[in-house]
Every structure is written in structure tokens, then in C-alpha cells.
Image: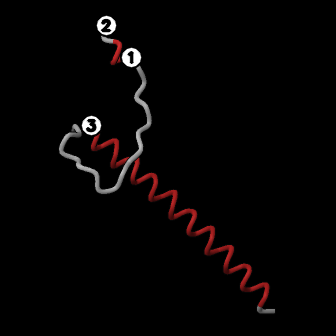
Amino acid sequence: MDWDEVRPKAHSIITVGEPLHELSVSDLEERLAALREEIRRVEKEIEAKRAHEKAASALFKR
């Protein structure tokens, strides 16, 4: 049994612009999935902030 196979992968920090040539296809796919999830998270936060701004604007325009 190889202990590297049983050990869970540590969450790595993704740095935009870092070289990708040393990453495996599997690593690249995981990275892409993580980036897509982060994009969804950021878009959701933007929507929430815009809704908050709109509500505040409507409140103070009365």
C-alpha cells in the first residue's frame, strides 16, 4: 500500500497566471472545477450586493 494514495489531498491555493505545464490533466481539471465554483460564488455575492444597493436606493428615494 502506498501511503500517498491514502492521504487526502491538501487544498492548494490557486494563483492566477502561474505556470500550468507541470500539472497533470487531473490536476488541471480539479483546478478548473475550483475556478468555476469560485466564479459562481463571486457572481452570487455580486447579485446580493446589487440587490442590497437597489433596496437601499429605493428606500432613500422616497
Q: Amino acid at mark 1?
A: Val
Q: Is residue 39 above or below residue 27?
A: below
Tell whether 24 sits left or right of 54.
left
For label 3, the SS is helix
Q: Nearer the viewer, residue 54 or 7?
A: 7
Separation of disc 3 and disc 1 at Cα? Answer: 17 Å
- The residue carrying mark 2 is 1
Q: Is residue 27 above or below residue 17?
A: above
Q: Amino acid at mark 2?
A: Met
Q: Is residue 38 above or below residue 1?
A: below
Of the numbered discs 2 and 3, the one sitting upstream in the chain is 2
* Tag 2 and tag 1, C-beta contact below 8 Å: yes
Tell whether 34 sits left or right of 28.
right
Mark 1 residue crowding within 10 angstroms, few (<14) / some (14–19) / many (20+): few
- The residue carrying mark 1 is 6
Q: Give the residue furthest to the left.
A: 21
Identify the residue shown where x is 29% and y is 43%: 29
